[in-house]
Structure formats: C-alpha cells, structure tokens
Image (tube, grey):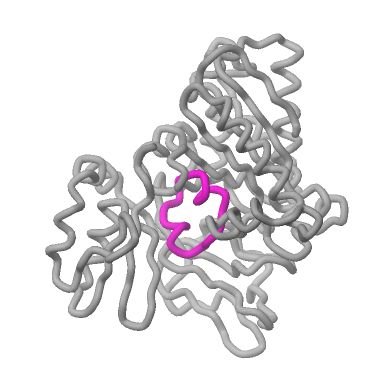
Amino acid sequence: MLGQRARGSGPTVFVTTMLHGNEPAGARAFQRVFGDIERNETAVHGEIVGVAGNLAAHDAGRRFFQDDLNRIWTPERVSALRAQDPAHDAAEEIEQRAILAELDAALGRARGPFIVLDLHTTSGESPPFALMSDVLRNRPYAFALPVPVILGLEETVDGTLLEYVTELGHCAVVVESGRHDDPASLDRHVAVIWLLLERAGIVASDDLPDVAGWRPSLADAARGLPRVVEVVQHHKIKPGENFVMVRTDFVGFQSVRRGEVLGRDQFHEHKAKHDGLLLMPRYQPEGDDGFFVVRRVHRFWLWLSRRVRRRGSWLRFLPGVSRHPTLARTFVVRPPARWFVLQMFHLFGYRKRRREGDVWTFTKRKERL
C-alpha cells in the first residue's frame, strides 16, 4: 500500500498505480499528493487509499512477467484466485492477490460512493485522456477531468480492473497521462488525483494546492482534441506475431485514414479500417494491444443516451434481436439485424460486444448496486 487516510464517513477514492511494472508515474504522483495531504494536515472527508501493482515487474524493468496484471480481472480468474492456495500463485497472481485484499478491505469499510482511479502511461507520445465503462454513474468523475474521454474499450479488451470494478456496481475511471518516461506524465497524474478528490467531495476546493493551475494544465495538454471518442478498431496481437508499428513517430490522437498501414508482422500489414484518430500505438516488447483507432462522439448522443438509458427493454423488438436466455442485461443479435443496431445498442449502454459466427451478443454494465 502506498498510503491510506480516512476521516469519518464519506466517499472512498481507491487509487491503483503501476499495474504495469514499467509505468511508475502514477505511484510517484500518489506519493506526492499523499505527502502534501499529510504535511498540510488537509481535511479529508471520507477515505483515500493508494496501492502499487506489479512491484516485482517494476524492480525487473518489465511490464509484466507471465500475465498482464490488467487483463486477469475477469470474474472467473478472480474466483479461481480466491480458491487457490497462495503457495501456487504465479508472479502476477501474487500481486493481484495483494491488490484484491486491499480492495476488499476498502469496500468493507466504505460508507459512501466508491470510486477507483486507475493510473497508467503509454509507450508512445500521447496527450492525457480518460477511459470509462459507459455507465451513467462513471460520467461525473470522468468528465470532471478536462481531457478526452474514451468509450468502448470494454468492447475489445477483457479482464481489466476497470471492468471488474464497474461490474461490481461501483465507479471506475482510468487515466493515461502520457509517455512512460515523460516528466509531464507525473505532473498530470498529480493534477488528476487532486481533481478527482475534489469531485468526489473528499477534499474541498479551498484545500487544493495550486487549485488554479491543475485544471488549466490538463486542459492545455489536451487542447484541440475531441471531448469524447469511441473505439472503432483494436488490433490485438496474436501469439507468435512479431508486431511492430511501421513508424516510430506515431503519437496519440494522430489522424489516420482508412487503408493507411499502421503496423506489420511477419505475415501481414495491419491497416486502419476507418478514418479516425490513432490511440496507444505499441512501442514496447510486451503486451498484446497493437493499436486502437477512435472517432469523435457528438455530445448530443451522450445527452440523448442519458434520457433514454432506462428504456432499453424495447430493443428486443428490433429485427433479429432477442434477450439472451441465461445472461442478465444481454441481448442476442442475429441476421437480419440492420446496420443501425450497433448504434442503437451503444445509445442504450450495451457496449460489451462479442461475436460467434454470425451471432452477436451485447451486454450492458450494471448501472447501480
């Protein structure tokens, strides 16, 4: 644990850092913020907890050893870990068990809203941005930060801590602050932590150091970027592929055109399937996310989705759509479903999308406890 401070009842902000061992900026940022709170005896209304994730990988200069620590938070993996003899834990399971113990304990103590803030950095140049599962309770915290917000990651990536916490019914926001070794990434994470503590009501605005500077510093780093985007393409690297980006100077949110070659391996070239913006090009040897392509979402659709979100039951009347026979909050989509079905499911918050042959399933995250 990096630190814990509590006073009375109120919200909990649980900050996770360094789930990837080569991303230490979040841990250093939390230590700076926590040190300021301790030295200045800042009034805390609720609880602040900070944990560092893959310490062993960090000590070895690695992202991870056997498993990506931010891809093993599926319900099945967590249940198996709880039942497993700790003596049999693999490298990342040791770290996951320690985080899970702190998370369980904090949830047991919580007497108000519970918000997880997961801090990361990228292997390439990038402005700061936030990620969230598209449930309404996450929006106030993600949009409290003056950076782009990414929707739809949960459609393409399984087993993240973000997904695990959201499915428990709590709030979770991920922030990527920039390149791993960029000093600005640490400063941006400091700003993010203070602003989330303020938005949660744990620290009063008047008690924030440099309160006038945190928000403009983040806004300047994201100037000119769309406020909200959604993932439309994810290149997942298959085992045995020697994937590399075709250029070493791609940066986050760089415009790309449909058909543009972005990466290659020993078998294929990998092209952009849509016009959009490039996100998180991989410039490190570990990890199976090659790149993402995102596109702008107009704020009107967010407003409309809030108005209609609780009226999703009529989706079953769309052609080719039926409720899943066993899975909660899940629809099955078969031909002759039309092109607009995807947009309709997104509007109503059904963003967990999986395909088997011609059949799609769409699942909605739990909106409340």
The answer to which of 1 and 304 lies nearer the viewer is 1
Location of the C terminus (image quadrant): top left
> Quick check: 253 left or right of 47?
left
Residue placed at 60% from the left, 42% from the top?
118
Q: Quadrant of residue 105?
A: top right
Q: Quadrant of residue 362?
A: bottom left
Q: Is residue 357 above or below residue 30?
A: below
Q: Position of residue 81 (x, y in %)?
A: 66, 55
Of 270 and 66, nearer the camera is: 66
Q: Nearer the viewer, residue 253 or 229?
A: 229
Looking at the picture, how far across and down is residue 21, in whole percent?
76, 52
Judged from this view, the residue extending furthest toward the bottom is: 267
318 horizontally vs 230: left or right: left
Answer yes or no: is residue 188 visible. Answer: no
- What residue is at 38 percent from the left and 74 percent from the top? 355
Say whether residue 151 is magenta: yes
Residue 171, horizontal then vertical, whole percent: 47, 38
Residue 269 vertical position relative to residue 325 in the rendered view, above or below = below
Task: Give coordinates of residue 120: x percent, y percent.
Answer: 64, 47
* Residue at the image position 56 percent from the left and 16 percent from the top: 203
| Badge count | 0
Rendered residue at 76%/58% (across/down): 89
Tell me if residue 176 can be seen.
yes
Range of residues picked out in magenta: 148-166
Work out which quarter of the rendered image holds the N terminus and state it. Answer: top right
